[in-house]
Structures are given as structure tokens and as C-alpha cells.
Amino acid sequence: KQEVTQIPAALSVPEGENLVLNCSFTDSAIYNLQWFRQDPGKGLTSLLLIQSSQREQTSGRLNASLDKSSGRSTLYIAASQPGDSATYLCAVYGNKLVFGAGTILRVKS
Amino acid sequence: EAQVTQNPRYLITVTGKKLTVTCSQNMNHEYMSWYRQDPGLGLRQIYYSMNVEVTDKGDVPEGYKVSRKEKRNFPLILESPSPNQTSLYFCASSPDRADTQYFGPGTRLTVL
């Protein structure tokens, strides 16, 4: 059974800092991995999707990497801003989409 | 605007009173699904639909029903709600099950 773990559970950083969020999964037989952002009281917004054959994806200040063999992904956020404050979720798709519990990020101005 | 809509956004009801949460998408997506999100348990899939008239159980289907009579709509039905179904519910759609998922804004359900 696929299990997805996200570390840390919560993170508070000053504005401008570069940061890394971690995601690990137990079954490497996946088609893709997605990173989502969830704002309080709102739905999930897809940030990046990495196919199993890819090593990384970039969108603006976000860079996500995938190491399928070790069961790990990282989301790198450059030059963090207060508007980045949200919960970040990773989800892996094998035969179904399995979510991690998320990392609550707070960027202080 | 491409979007997934859910209604109602908030609902307080009593045990045993049947309810339906609607979900609609305007992106012509084949795949739709329902999730519930609970503190400490994360997001768990309730039901999914690969295309019209094809639905299947997710991880936590007990107490829920769905139907997919049209491509754009995927309602979630609680025939006899119970307090343990108090949760935040999300509908999602995607072109294919392995594609980027687009989520609705969520429905916060409280069953007293």
C-alpha cells in the first residue's frame, strides 16, 4: 500500500529565504507525482506535475525534483514571499492518487 | 473560465437526512473524483469515474453514492448521513486519471 510522507509538517521562514519541502513515498511504481497548494478555506491548486520519466519540473520560482528509485521528491521555492504562505501537498499516482498530509508554510514579512 | 464548481459550499444537516452535493466541470474532462479531507488523515478518495456511466469505489466509499449520467456532472449522494461523515469534501476532474487534477473549492459538511 502506497504511503506518502511530507516533512516538515510545518515551516516558518522569513521573507526572501529559499526553502525546500520534502515528500517521500514507499512504492516507486508510479506514473507521476504532483505538488499542490491549498489556501485556507479553498480547494487545491496544482503547481507542478512530474512524470515518472522526468527528473524535475520548473514553474517560475518553483522547482520540483523526482527521484523515483529512492522514493523522494522535493519542492524548492526560491525567494519566498508572504503570498507563498499555504499548505503544500504532494500526491503520487500509481494505480490511484495518494496524498501526503501536507506541509504548512508560513512566510513572515 | 475553466473551473470545477461545487454546491453547496457549506451545509449543516442532521443524521439520516438525505443530501446531495453537486459537482460540475466545464473542461470536458473524462475523469472525475470525490475526496474527503480530515485533520490527521489527509485527502482520501471516495469514488471516481473514468467516464460517463463508469464509476468505481475509492478508499472510503462506505455511506456514499455517486452517479455519472453526463460528462460534466458528478454528484455525491449521502443517503443517510452520520456524524462521522462530517468533513471537507472536494470534487476534482482531469482529462485522464493520470493527468493534472483540477479541484473544486470544497464543501464543508457538518452532520449533527
Image: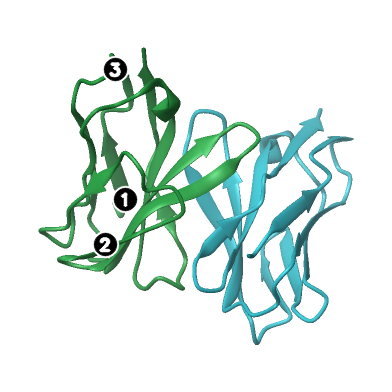
Chain colours: A cyan, B green
Q: Which residue does the numbered mark 2 point to in the structure image?
A: B27
Q: Label 2 marks which chain's residue? A: B
Q: Can you say whether B20 is above or below A26 in the image?
A: above
**Circle 2: residue type:** Met
A2 and B105: which is toward the camera = A2
**Cα distance in 3D space between marks 3 and 2:** 35 Å
- The residue depicted at 83 percent of the width and 76 percent of the height is A70
B83 and B68: which is toward the camera = B83
Q: Label 3 marks which chain's residue? A: B
- The residue depicted at 81 percent of the width and 28 percent of the height is A109
Q: Which residue does the numbered mark 1 point to in the structure image?
A: B3
B84 and B37: which is toward the camera = B84
Q: Can you say whether A27 is above or below A23 in the image?
A: below
- The residue depicted at 23 percent of the width and 21 percent of the height is B16
At mark 1, the secondary structure is loop
Label whose residue precedes the other's in the sequence (3 or 2): 3
**Cα distance in 3D space between marks 3 and 1:** 31 Å
The answer to whether marks 3 and 1 sit on the same chain is: yes
**Cα distance in 3D space between marks 2 and 1:** 7 Å
Quarter of the picture holding the N terminus of chain A: bottom right
At mark 3, the secondary structure is loop
At mark 2, the secondary structure is loop
Label whose residue precedes the other's in the sequence (3 or 1): 1
Label whose residue precedes the other's in the sequence (2 or 1): 1
**Circle 1: residue type:** Gln
Q: Quadrant of residue B54?
A: bottom left
